[in-house]
Image (spheres, grey):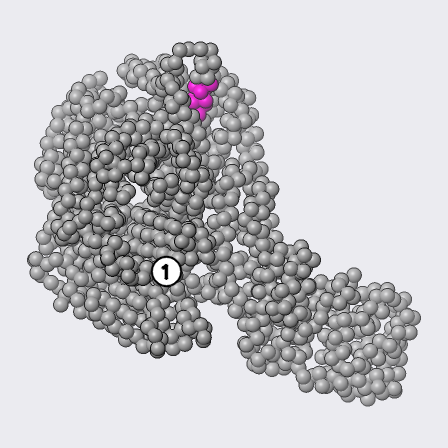
Amino acid sequence: MSVELDVFVGNTTIMDEEVYQLWLDGYTVNDAVKVRMEGGVLEECEASADVLLSDTMDQYRTFQMCERLLHSPAKLANQLLFQIPPHRQVVLIERYYTFDDAFVREVLGKKLSKGTKKDLDDVSAKTNVTLKSCRRQFDNFKRVFKVVEELKGPLVENIRQHFLLSDKLARDYAAIVFFANNRFETGKRKLQYLTFQDFAFCAGQLINNWTVGAVDNMVEDMDVDLDKEFLQELKELKILITDKDLLDQHKSLVCTALRGKTKAFNEMEANFKVRIKSHGHHILHVLAHLLAHGHFIEPCRSDRWTTADMRLYLTHYTNSAHILDTFKHQVVWDRYMGVVKSCIFKMYHD
Amino acid sequence: MPGKLKAKIVAGRHLPVMDRASDLTDAFVEVKFGNTTFKTDVCPKSLNPQWNSEWFKFEVDDEDLQDEPLQITVLDHDTYSANDAIGKVYIDIDPLLCSEAASVISGWFPIYDTIHGIRGEINVLVKVELFNDLNRFRQSSCGVKFFCTTSIPRCYHVATVHGFVEELVVNEDPEYQWIDRIRTPRASNEARQRLISLMSGELQRKIGLKVLEMGGNAVVGYLQCFDLEGESGLVVRAIGTACTLDKLSSGSVSNTNTNTHVALPSSSPPPFTPSKPCSRQSSSSDTDLSLTPKTGMGSGGSAGKEAGPLKMLLRQQTQTALEQREFPFFTLTSFPAGFLVHAGGVVSARSVKLLDRIHNPDEPETRDAWWEEIRQEIKSHAKALGCHAVVGYSESTSICEEVCILSASGTAAILNPRYMREGCLDFGNTDHSCGFCHIPYDELNMPFPAQLTLCQHCRQQKVPDVLFTTIDLPPEAAVTGKGCFVQARLCRLKKKAQGEVNATAISNLLPFMEYELHTQLMNKLKLHSMNALFGLHIQISVGENMLLGLASATGVYLTALPAPGGIQIAGKAPIDLSNEHHIFTIQKRINDTIAKNKELYQINPPELTEEVIGSPIPEPRQRSRLFRSHSESSDELSELDLSHGKKDAFVLELDDTDALEDIHSLLTDAPPPNGFFSCNTEIMPGIYKWTSAVQMFTSVRVFRLSNVNLTNQGLNKIFTDLCEDLLKSFYFKLRSLIPCCLCHLNFTVAVPEEELIQVAVTAVAMSYDKEQTHEKPVDKLIIRGNSETEEQLQFPMELCADSSSVNMQTSKFSGSIPASIDYGSFADRCTTWLELLRLKAHTIRRGSVKTSRTTHSLGRSRSLRSNCSFGGSTVTVVKMTPLSFLPGTRIIKYLGIINMFFIRETTSLREEGGVSGFLHSFIAEVFAMVRAHVAALGGNAVVSYSMKECVLMENPNKNQAQCLINVSGDAVICVLDTDQEVTPTPTTVTQTCGIGAEGTA
């Protein structure tokens, strides 16, 4: 004796947010029922386990039917199959596209390819996020990536308009797309302590200041490709290291400004040259190193600089360059250091 | 050429990919009406094509306009092979034929395919131009309005109720024609959908003609059904009540006073006072106002007998009006004030027929004769009850192979002739809050044994001890406490057989089933301490090896009827000690349940509340008063009290194990959880102030009985559990609406195959204000008595489960202190529980947004442009409800009837998520199509919605399933009650001037 068929359909689609989350998290129906039972919903409503199972099945089916629409959220608003109040639609979409921080840290900067998708079971095992949920999140990244790839205009805005996401979530996706496009590796051991939000912040800085879109906002890929002209110009900054006079001048200016203001000054002075020289590498390396931060942040951390020390140092380092008479690349310098400064501030934590 | 139909295809969206190579579609549209077809251009390579076609014009007879649907087919153009169909839209243009309904159909329709379901949407515009036709012998009936609603539609005023109209048409079922062997399932399904659409159009037209003949202009309570008779054919039949309706000019008054109508003689009826305070004086003063001779109305003890002549007179008057009619039946379930004089009780008739092939579809005589027979039987039953009319009338069938059970039921009644014919004398009745309960039959010559007592309300006429009806609770009726959903369920095994033998076996079983269902209902009613049933619907469904019986109704305590006695258990077996003990415990459980239910439904008969006014006494004291009030009753009440004594002897005999099982099954029905009530009628007595939160739903369950050796008892238990589990799962799913009432719970059962039981339910959940204020003075008294315990009363189950012994004590002793402490603590617990719920909900909500801080980008203004594109949603919200109204709103326009029939089939059942997945998406699709049609008519709601048919056939081994669904309802425009300004959409009636519907016949 068994229930062969059991459905419940409301004119207004009934969705329980708790069950939705369980579904998104990749729980099977039976596991979801267990979680709900532990949550005590039964006692509250005088219901039995059968009722809960039936309810969970109904909701899972509804979500599965909705999933197709969630892949292109704009359709959700003008489809006819499900009558869902607008505020519910917002929640459905936002939650569907919300991702786990643990998961995104694993995938950030990797190519969103089939190969990566195949490795998701490893990611799942490592992050404790179910494989089903991993796949959904990965597919979301890929879907957003594909859609915005072909669009003109600002990246964040495009994501928000096409996927009807909140500003915050749209920015996060912009960061994911940016990293995936530029393949900035974030999996290195030394970067392990950085959170996704740290990277997202840096991506935001780079998008806003260093991409093509920072100068011209009507070209394709304006927010994912770095401004090549700017990168060329950055080479000019090498003069700060290659020119001996300039380097000495700059060094003494910084030292004068810092003297007596911080305990860490001595170590700072010792390392100063190294630090400045590290900027002299090929400009793309600088970028990579900035993110890898092996050459700058790591030594500072080992020298136990405080956040305040770091701020002080970078501020004076930037400002001193302005005083140098022979240094003519003030505009590029500002565009460069503005981002470097804020990124380092963000990343300089435990 | 009496009509011109114009259609324009505007655009499509979300079309499916038909060309795998390009991932696109080359779509075009065929528009077909009758035998004329037009085509749009092909819109190449687009999933969102813009056709913007010219106006396609069809010049047709209005007869065809009524019968035929407009058929729109979307296809994918293919240069080399045949064009692939994407899907179809059938548009019923009937609403455009009535000047008072919709004037244009315009909107997005889901493109539907019977194999793939909804595949994108299409935007269509349809208009009709009608020309005047004065031909008396015309076959069309344009302009007759149809309503599914079984009461007078809210923005109309009824001038005359003409009476019963019925019609049926038969045809061969395309599914069973020889051609079906060679055509595709899609073609077969479409042929069937189209045929049924045609047949229901024809049926509606024929009924319309009858209405015009009678001089009416509308059909109210229109009930259309399909009988899928398989090999022997397809029957579409309909019944309804013909009326003459006048549109209310302002649309502001919903309950009209009939005095104003021209057709009435000058003698104006007495002003109605819908609810009287429950005291004898006021009710007798009411009679003084009426035109009736005062004889028999005096407050003597012999009131009941002297009322005889009045009844006779009344009967004679009405008879003239009703006897002209073949069947004085009315499909209405609620009536204009004063229409219903007395309700006698439920009348029903069933007959078992063997289906044979319908040889000549144009002469559907056999089926007509069958129904004629049944209706005659109903009529004679009503006569036996001393009634000349049947209200709340409905008909249904159940078919299994070649056997068909035809059923009809209704409520025998005496009606006020005023509404039937002009020129009849008006008989203002005594008091409408109890008048309908008074017996219509002769006291000395009763049709069945019944306990008669004096009406508890007016003390002048006799009333029965219980009253069963198929109608809705009259709004003016005086009711004590709240109502509740009562259901009797029954399974009976039968031997598999063929032909006559089978039919005989079934008809032999039927009376026993009816009897048992009736007994169950009666017991459950007593268990709820109630004395009347409304909206009673008994369904008997036949399968190959069993019969299912399901009776649903709403129980109430009518103030006018005597209080029901308890249930007493008596053992017949030789008394041994254990048995006696057993009986004692059962008796105790029954008594407990009755006490609990009294509390839950706030049943405190008004006599005692009169005593309690002013000083709210805690609940248990009230109950103790109850007993005393009986013992110290006055002389006037002596007769009544005697009968009370007699009635307490409602004895259940425990003579065998079966009886024991029956009693146990009585007690297994769990009351709804806290914060829930349920009913199957339009009005839930005792609940006021609905909020506008409405959730209509359909739920279907199929249960497989794999155990071969089943007994009747075992089956009963399974069936009962199935129904109970369904209810429980509704309560759980709808818990966010608490406090909430499930209204119009409509169960239908079927035995689709051997060993399968299917239960389908459609209902609406409506939440109400927690602070209940009552309009009725009678109720106010009750509420004043226990308003402080209101909170506690919501949670009686918990109380009783925890401390049934305490409960017993409090009812015995009047010492209320311990009990009240208990109540308090429960209240506390409940509130904290609610707090907890709220808290939980809150944390969930917070957890969903994982933001901790927002990083604003510096210096770029472009990011500040925010868009919230949800505001621009193009989809109109369409509310649906099986009730005739939506709480908090006012219907300002009826746009026409919605009557849709869909077939869905799949050959990839597993891939669609099994039968559940298949049916789930189909039901969702049906809802979507109903909503789309209503929105295209310019409406925003469907009232009186019902799912008439849901036939599911599955073959999981072949990975196949097929389902047929038929739904109907009234499309309406409603506005919020708070909007004072009535804004009827600018009526562009000029084009569609129907042929004078009022006066032609």
x and y percentages locating residue A113 in the rendered image: 61, 70
**Left or right: where B91 falls relative to B737:** left
- The residue nearer to you, when weighing B41 against B731, is B41
Quadrant of the rendered structure where residue B835 is? top right
* Total numbered labels placed on residues in the image: 1
User: Regarding mark 1 in the picture, which secondary structure is present there?
Assistant: loop
- The residue nearer to you, when weighing B208 against B541, is B541
Q: Is residue B17 above or below residue A88?
A: below
Q: Quadrant of the N terminus of chain A?
A: top left
Q: Can the viewer see residue B754?
A: yes
x and y percentages locating residue B485 in the rendered image: 37, 35
Q: Quadrant of the C terminus of chain A?
A: bottom right
**Magenta run includes residue B589:** yes
> Which residue does the numbered mark 1 point to in the structure image?
B115
Magenta region: B585-595
Residue drawn 42% across the image and 11% down it: B575
Residue drawn 58% across the image and 54% down it: A26
- The residue nearer to you, when weighing B146 against A73, is A73
Kindly identify the amino acid type of the residue bearing the numbered disc 1. Answer: Ile
Residue drawn 59% across the image and 61% down it: A135
Q: Main secondary structure of the magenta part?
A: helix
**Magenta run includes residue A213:** no
x and y percentages locating residue A296 in the rendered image: 81, 72
